[in-house]
Amino acid sequence: MNNPGDQIKTYEKTNAYTGAMFADPHSLITQMIDGALTRISQAKGAIIRGEIANKAELISKAILIIGSLEGCLDHDKGGELSQNLASLYEYMSLTLAQANIHNDIAQLEEVSNLMLEIKSAWIQIPEQLQRASA
C-alpha cells in the first residue's frame, strides 16, 4: 500500500505542474515567488527541528526558484529595473547559501522579507499591463 505522505507529494507535484501549465506569465511568476517563500519557511522549520539534510534540500530548491525568477527577467525591456532585480536575486541566493552553511534563521527571514516585498509590488501590477505582457 502506498504511504499517504507519498500520495500527498504526488498530488502536490501534479497540482503544481497543471497550475503552471495553464497559468499566464504574471500568475506563473507569482507561483514561483510563493514557491520560494514556502521552501524558505519550510527550511526554517527544518532548522528548528534539526533536520539538516531536509533544510539543505529546501534551501537548494528556493535558490533554484530564485535563479529561475532571474532567468525570466527581460533585460532589453526591463532596463535598470531588471538589472536591479537581477542583483537582488543574486544577493538572495548568496544569503540563502550562507543561511544553509550557518543554519541561520535570521538570514532566511531576511530573504523571505525581500521576496515578500517583490511579491507585493508584483501583484499590484494592473491587470491591463499583465494582459499586455502575456
Image (tube, rainbow, N blue to C red):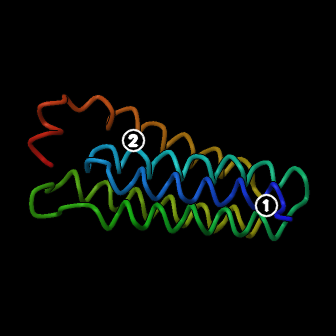
Q: Is residue 24 left or right of residue 87?
A: left
What's the mark number on residue 118?
A: 2
Q: Which amino acid does label 2 sit on?
A: Ile
Q: From what the image shows, is residue 102 above or below residue 32?
A: below
* Number of marks drawn: 2
Is 14 above or below relative to 134? Answer: below
Front residue of 76 and 5 = 5
Q: Which residue is at 45% across, 48% downward?
A: 33
Q: Residue farthest to the front?
A: 1
Q: In this view, which residue lies farthest toward the right?
A: 50
Question: What residue do we see at 58% from left, 61% from top?
Answer: 95
- Per the image, the residue denoted by label 1 is 103
Q: How far apart are marks 1 and 2 (CA)?
A: 24 Å
- Badge number at residue 71: none
The amino acid type, in three-letter code, at marker 1 is Asn
- Image quarter for residue 13? bottom right
**Residue 75 place in picture, x, y as percent:** 17, 63
Local SS, label 2? helix
Q: Residue 49 at what x, y percent from top left? A: 90, 52
Measured as percent of width and height from the top left, residue 106 is found at 70, 47
